[in-house]
Image: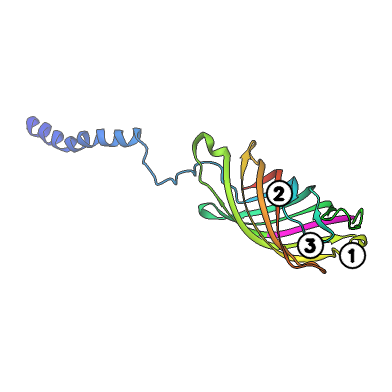
């Protein structure tokens, strides 16, 4: 009878001993859960940048072959830009700047009399841009190149001394450019860029003239996540 009881007891304990290694293994190895992978490199939701730059016009705004031409002198500029970023590196930005410049008089005929000074020319620009930020990962992720294309308006405010040769004008403007964001702190960036602003100046006493204004800028921004 004792032998039968031992056999019965062993048959009851055998499943327990068989399951014990499985339970121990589950206790040692935690269950793997579906944890989303962290995105590679810093990716912001909104960038706000204040910048200074240098703007130079590549074309005359008026040109009378019999007397003189006028152009906007190169000038320092001050501006701000805000960019809202979406998925896949695309963003929409609002960019504006002011350049306190002067009008330059360029004689075409040394025998013709022309004004010595046409006064100030305040240059204002406001555009909306579509941007694409290149995906970068690894150690180089702190440098984020971008390209942009946009459009808006340019307003040129001149002094009364320039009339009637040059008068205040507001013209449509196309812009394209490239640059890069360089992140040097968790929420601080440096932004460098080069942009071409294309517009058509419709002078009061001259034909419409295509304008190319080049802006090179350097800015410091705050990055919102």
The local crowd at label 3, few if under 14, some if 14 to 19, many if 20 or more residues have their Cα within 10 Å, is: some
Magenta stretch, residue numbers: 119-127
Q: Is residue 205 above or below residue 197?
A: below
Q: How far across and down, in percent of the image, does residue 38 sit? A: 48, 43
**Alpha carbons under labels 3 and 1: distance apart:** 16 Å
Q: Are marks 2 and 1 in contact (CB under 8 Å)?
A: no
117 sits left or right of 99 in the view: right
User: Which quadrant, please, contains the N terminus?
Assistant: top left
User: Main structural element of the magenta stretch: helix, strand or loop?
Assistant: strand
Q: Is residue 55 above or below residue 171?
A: above
**Does 178 appear in magenta?**
no
Picture residue at 34% right of the left edge, 35% below the top: 27
Q: How far across and down, in percent of the image, does residue 183 sit? A: 62, 39
- Asked which quadrant contains residue 222, the reply is top right
The residue where tag 2 is placed is 215
Q: Is residue 213 above or below residue 1?
A: below
Q: Is residue 137 above or below residue 93?
A: above
The residue where tag 3 is placed is 155
Disc 3 versus disc 1: nearer the observer: 1
Q: Nearer the viewer, residue 86 or 116?
A: 116
**Alpha carbons under labels 2 and 1: distance apart:** 27 Å
Q: How far across and down, in percent of the image, does residue 174 sit? A: 66, 61
The residue where tag 1 is placed is 163
Number of numbered tags placed on the structure image: 3
Earlier along the polypeptide chain: callout 3 or callout 1? 3
Identify the element where label 2 is drawn. Answer: strand
Picture residue at 75% right of the left edge, 49% below the top: 55
- Asked which quadrant contains residue 31, the reply is top left
Identify the element where label 1 is drawn. Answer: loop
Q: Which mark is residue 88?
A: none
**Does 122 appear in magenta?**
yes
């Amino acid at each position: 009878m004792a032998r039968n009881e031992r056999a019965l007891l062993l048959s009851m304990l055998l499943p327990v001993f068989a399951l014990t290694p499985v339970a121990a293994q589950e206790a040692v190895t935690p269950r793997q859960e579906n944890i989303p992978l962290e995105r590679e490199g810093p990716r912001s939701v909104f960038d706000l940048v204040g910048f200074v730059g240098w703007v130079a016009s590549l074309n005359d705004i008026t040109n009378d072959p019999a007397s003189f031409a006028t152009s906007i002198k190169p000038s320092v500029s001050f501006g701000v830009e805000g960019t809202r970023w979406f998925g896949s590196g695309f963003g929409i930005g609002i960019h504006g700047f002011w350049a306190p410049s002067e009008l330059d008089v360029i004689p075409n005929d040394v025998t013709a009399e022309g004004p010595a000074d046409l006064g100030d020319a305040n240059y204002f620009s406001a555009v909306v841009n579509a941007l694409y930020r290149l995906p970068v990962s690894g150690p180089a992720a702190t440098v984020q190149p971008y390209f942009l294309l946009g459009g808006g308006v340019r307003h040129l405010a001149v002094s009364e001394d320039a009339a009637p040769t040059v008068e205040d004008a507001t013209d449509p403007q196309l812009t394209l450019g490239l640059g890069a964001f360089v992140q040097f702190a968790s929420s601080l960036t440096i932004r460098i860029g080069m942009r071409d602003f294309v517009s058509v100046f419709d002078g009061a006493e001259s034909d419409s003239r295509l304008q190319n204004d080049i802006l090179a800028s350097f800015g410091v921004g705050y990055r919102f996540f």
